[in-house]
Image (cartoon, grey):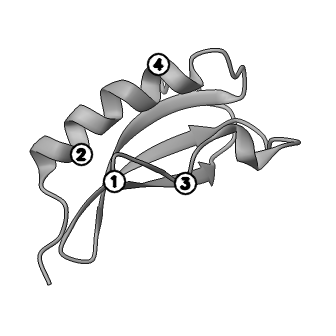
Amino acid sequence: MEGVSIERARAAKSEVMVRVASIPQVNGVGLARIDHGYAVKVNLSEPLERISAIPSEVNGIPILVDVVGSIVARK
């Protein structure tokens, strides 16, 4: 089975970034390798009260949600 291409995942990432822009717990949106293709990964600083605020997929591209905590710069 063929997975999602990186080009399709990048296009979906742009749309996901717009959709989650107003959610303060989102601290990153990127791409993740899954199975034989790619997904969009949304990183959160803390769990959301309503996980349904983030779609499970956009245009057939899976969305992974991960609580990673606060992001801090290394010295």
Residue under pointer 3: 56
Q: Secondary structure at mark 4?
A: helix
Residue 52 horizontal/vertical position (percent)? 73, 46
Residue under pointer 4: 18
Q: Amino acid at mark 2?
A: Ala
Residue at the image point whose x is 56% and y is 41% from the top? 43
**Height in image: 69 above or below 32?**
above
Residue at the image point whose x is 34% and y is 46% from the top? 59
Q: Amino acid at mark 1?
A: Ile
User: Few, some or many C-alpha atoms within 10 Å of disc 2 (few <14, some 14-19, many ≥20)?
Assistant: many
In this rendering, the count of numbered labels is 4
How far apart are the alpha carbons under marks 3 and 1?
A: 9 Å
Residue under pointer 1: 61
Residue at the image point whose x is 44% and y is 47% from the top? 41
Residue under pointer 2: 9
Q: Secondary structure at mark 3?
A: loop
How far apart are the alpha carbons under marks 4 and 3?
A: 15 Å
- State which tag comes first along the sequence, 3 or 1: 3
**Height in image: 16 above or below 52?**
above
Would you say 60 lies left or right of 71 here? left
Q: Are marks 2 and 1 in contact (CB under 8 Å)?
A: yes
Would you say 1 lies left or right of 51 here? left
* Image quarter in which the N terminus is found: bottom left
